[in-house]
Amino acid sequence: MEPFQTFFQEHDEHGVLPAVVHEKPKTSKFEDSNNVFDFIVVGGGSAGAVVANRLSRNNKVLLLEAGTDPLPMQSIPGFTLEFMHSPYVDWMYRTVPQKYSHFGQIHENVSMWPRGKTLGGSSTLNYMLYKSLAYYDGQYKENSEHYGRGSQEIGLNVESKPEETIPLLPYIIEAGKELGFDNVSDLNGPQRTGFGTIEYTQKRGARHGTYDAYIRPIKHRKNLVISRLSHAIKIKLNRHNHAIGVWYSRHGKTHLARARKEIILSCGAVGSPQLLMLSGIGPKEHLQSVNIKPRIDLPVGQNLKDHLAVILHSVILDNTEKKWSIFPDYDYNPWALFNYLSEGKGPFSFPSPFSSQGFISTSIEKSMEWPNLQLYTSSLGLYDLLASDLSRLMGFKQEPIEMILKDQFGKNAFSSLVTLVRPKSVGEILLRDRNPESHPLINPNYLNDPRDVQAIVEGAQFSRKMFEDTQVLKKLRAKMTRQPLPGCEGHEIFSSDYWECYVRHLCMTLYHPAGTCAMGRGNNDPKTVVDTTLRVLNSRWLRVVDASIMPEIVNGNTNSPTIMIAEKASDIIREYWSEQYLVSPIVEYLFDQHFRAKCFYSVMV
């Protein structure tokens, strides 16, 4: 394969080609003469799978995916942890060292950032928690006032778990009531604070991501060409900055595919800005610093936001009336696997033993309409390998966690996850160099804004009050472990200073990066990369469709909103191109400028 550096040097200047290629273009040594499509979709993840499905109904579509099909075992929720950080299905990104957080990491202050590298993307790797306001088919779908009926072709399935399988659930909801929070049974309904159940993107207990919902049913469609193991390395722009093709590497060779209509980037909040910058679209000075010729000066890679989470001290349950917790080393047994394979039930149907979720507002926000904290409880017992599993999953140092849990292993317990869903800290993604194989420099800038620390500390204090001071949980004799985290022993246990120290040590990503190709009103907005129809500014025939376009991160799980973005974008794109060939009555064509701008043909009436 030609070295990437030589390749980029030879292709910094492009010839002129029409914006929409309606004839067979000239070929080069990098392209196949038949490699011409109506649309090219780069990335087959949560967004790209949807776009490829919708556009290939009536157009010839090429879907470029750097990975391949998900592994069959990924469909079993109970094995989710086993595929995190696996190079076959995960990009295995890492952040740069963080200045204000991640002090408890094995690798100095570096956060591990799993991102799906398969068809279905991160929907094949995530924990399947569903939080969205659209395209919903869960147990509350009859709430037509909020959800509407939606398209009958939407294949994403959403399920709830039977309450009897989550013994802690009614206790958590009742504890929330004692503190003035309603039982919000449908947390995907109108925005509000409260506690309720969790729903999952599953079908009969198995993972149901966008591969199963949008790709598998149509992967033999004649209009759709899926090119697996195809890593996009640069967008081909003509001298007018019109996107006309995509260079990609596959099996050690470089190829060029051309688009007659548009190129849609759905590479995610990390991949989409990286590909734009490699193509000369991004901050001018940064591109020059890595020897890439700037084509369009835009704030690509800026406005990075992510949901930061903290696992609090475990809560011991000294009530032995029943088994309250899940112990993987005991409950994940052959009988449980048989139960899952035959009925889709049992421990293997849980991606993680979350019991409930809730939303609260801290003093920073003061708005009950737009909560800034999402709280989870997890019925995970204190099993022997808990510390090593957390170390493997999040990169935490194992010894400090073992110190917190000293003498507590084997006990019924549950834990709490405090998640900051409206962060104030803003990060960025930059290129490491001009080599497409290099991972970009990811800097979320976690906890740079002191308001973020304050919010999580308030969440920790609220959680402790809920678990130890409510009457319903006192019946279970619930108590947080008191062993301080090594490194924070100098602070009084559970004081504000202690919690701040704890948060800065044991925080982690909730895998929800967004905002790096932000949508806005145009060039007057310093954050804007794409307009309100997701077209890249100052270019043509190039759009971005994924979580990177969110100007503000949503205050809940991001997978289903990303799917919603892709559905809406697909409608916008199809409508736009249908209008390009609109047949208009001659009167309107002659006298109505709006029609004249859209119509290629007219009829005499």
Image (spheres, rainbow, N blue to C red):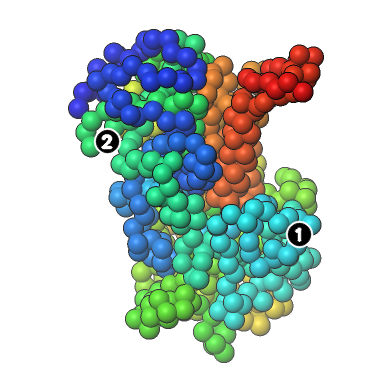
In the rendered view, tell whether residue 488 sits above or below residue 357.
above
Looking at the picture, how far across and down is residue 554, in whole percent? 64, 45
Residue pictured at 32% horizontal, 52% vertical = 86
Q: Quadrant of the N terminus?
A: top left
Give the mark nearer the N terminus: 2 vs 1. 1
Q: Quadrant of the C terminus?
A: top right
SS under mark 1: helix
Q: How dense is the environment of label 1, judged by Cα within 10 Å: few (below 14), some, or many (20 and up)?
A: few
Q: Nearer the viewer, residue 402 or 214?
A: 214
SS under mark 2: strand
Residue pictured at 22% horizontal, 23% vertical = 3
Looking at the picture, how far across and down is residue 568, in whole percent? 63, 41
Looking at the picture, how far across and down is residue 467, in whole percent? 64, 70
Q: Nearer the viewer, residue 191 or 415?
A: 191
Q: How many marks?
A: 2
* Residue carrying label 1: 144
Report if residue 255 is visible in the image: yes
* Residue carrying label 2: 250
Quadrant for residue 317, please give it. bottom right
Residue type pointed to by label 1: Ser
Residue pictured at 38% horizontal, 12% vertical = 14
Say the numbered circle drawn on residue 412.
none
Residue type pointed to by label 2: Arg
Looking at the picture, how far across and down is residue 34, in whole percent? 33, 29
Q: Nearer the viewer, residue 25 or 475?
A: 25
For this view, does 348 lie left or right of residue 7? right
Quadrant for residue 338, please give it. bottom left
Report if residue 493 is visible in the image: no
